[in-house]
Image (tube, rainbow, N blue to C red):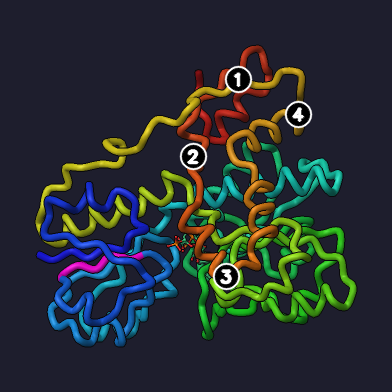
Amino acid sequence: MKIYYEDSLPYAAEFFAELGDSQVFSHKDVNAELVADADVLLVRSTTKVNAELLDANKGIQYVGTATAGTNHLDKAYLQSRGLGIHSAAGCNAVAVAEYVLSALFVMAEKLDWQLTDKTVGIVGAGHVGTRLSEKLTALGIQYCLCDPPLADAGDSRDFVTMDTIMQCDIISLHVPLVEGGQHNTAHMFDASRIAQLREDQLLINACRGEVIDNKALLASFVAGRELNIVLDVWENEPDIDQLLVPYIALATAHIAGHTVEGKARGTEMLYQQVCKQFGFDATKQLSDYLPSPQPSCINLDETLDGQALLSALVLSVYDIRKDSALFKSTIAQPDQFRYIRKNYSIRREFAALSVNTGNYLGSEAIYALGFNRK
Ligand SMILES: NC(=O)C1=CN([C@@H]2O[C@H](COP(=O)(O)OP(=O)(O)OC[C@H]3O[C@@H](n4cnc5c(N)ncnc54)[C@H](O)[C@@H]3O)[C@@H](O)[C@H]2O)C=CC1
Ligand SMILES: O=C(O)C(=O)[C@H](O)COP(=O)(O)O
């Protein structure tokens, strides 16, 4: 069995070596000829899988993406070839939720906000939206959820409309990119919705760039509006509109999901799927490969309290300001969006770390955020 995997799948060599003849490729070089004899094709979001890539391959049996989003897969084409849509749903949901928390604490400091006085409107209550809502609960921050597809499907949680979301202090977008149909998300934030945003609100997009009309957003800034926007994702990646960057409060290169665990979990999920489809025993697991974080234990700064203490803790694990500063100061260089993503430094999830809470009375909130007890 020939297994072809993109070089951005961590631990793919370790997971897949024994299942067949495995071969690595870069998304920059991948083409129909290269994968013409693949039985199994494993990608991440930067490889478009469509007729152009796979028509020459007559024997492909499995295509999987080690990501949550699947908009880079031509689903109609894969179905026409009798291939399922295999993804790593939820693999990086915790990573994105922790990215959003870092953004919230940084923006709260900038805007002089007490986050427990604010309400977060979460659009898309799937894996990411749910993990985010759990972490907000741990922090005592109110939220509401908008997810018409889940509401229609009978999900028992309380849902609100987009009109209610537009009244929230903070809006965080976690929908898939869906172009057209009843639940279209492409340009969900179009010119008219952007015009409704108030300057005392914060909008975070860590799902897909096309969910916000970037041209309309830029026009709004150029017209003098001082909106608070955090963007991890952009229209037309990696060739994004450079003019928009200086206006964005925190700007990053589509790395919200890029924790060590989030990326590696994606590989592990595809390994489990391939084993199941081809009748192998799945004997390997992520814990066999993940390195221990250094240091693995954090001591709380007990000179702080309340939001200041939680902010210091979260930012000590992941400080979005560093990623944003690097992005803003280098993004004008050729091919920089791709470069930052490929060379992204190691970031761990809260659950990889333990916290020594000492005499701190709010320790339960810290463990509910995902940290381990020391
Ligand atoms: N920036 C990054 O690194 C990452 C980005 N993503 C993006 O975030 C998206 C969400 O990820 P997950 O939560 O794992 O996916 P998911 O599929 O678990 O959840 C998405 C939710 O959005 C809902 N939804 C669909 N259309 C909607 C609409 N019009 N209005 C409101 N809700 C709607 C769905 O019903 C679903 O519950 C992914 O599709 C992907 O595009 C995901 C992980 C990492
Ligand atoms: O899972 C998703 O969906 C994402 O957006 C990933 O975090 C980013 O995927 P890659 O571009 O690294 O494949």
Q: Position of residue 290 (x, y in %)?
A: 35, 37
Residue 348: image tag? 2
Q: Is residue 266 left or right of residue 228?
A: left
Q: Residue at x 36, y 48 (%)?
A: 264
Q: Which three-letter amino acid code belongs to the residue tagged 1? A: Asn
Q: Which three-letter amino acid code belongs to the residue tagged 2? A: Arg
Q: Are marks 2 and 1 in contact (CB under 8 Å)?
A: no
Q: Which three-letter amino acid code belongs to the residue tagged 4? A: Gly
- Region of the chain picked out in magenta, as a range: 39-43
Q: Position of residue 305 (x, y in %)?
A: 76, 24
To which quarter of the image does residue 235 belong?
Answer: bottom right
The residue to which callout 4 is attached is: 306
Q: CA distance from mark 4 to mark 1?
A: 16 Å
> Cβ of disc 3 within 8 Å of ligand 2?
no
> Cβ of disc 4 within 8 Å of ligand 1?
no
Q: First in sequence: mark 4 or mark 3?
A: 4
Q: Is residue 359 above or below residue 309?
A: above
Q: First in sequence: mark 4 or mark 2?
A: 4
Q: Position of residue 215 (x, y in %)?
A: 71, 80
Q: Is residue 290 left or right of residue 57?
A: right
The residue to which callout 1 is attached is: 299
Q: Which of the pair 103/53 is nearer the observer?
A: 53
Q: Which three-letter amino acid code belongs to the residue tagged 3? A: Pro
Nearer mark to the viewer, of 4 and 1: 1
Nearer mark to the viewer, of 3 and 2: 3
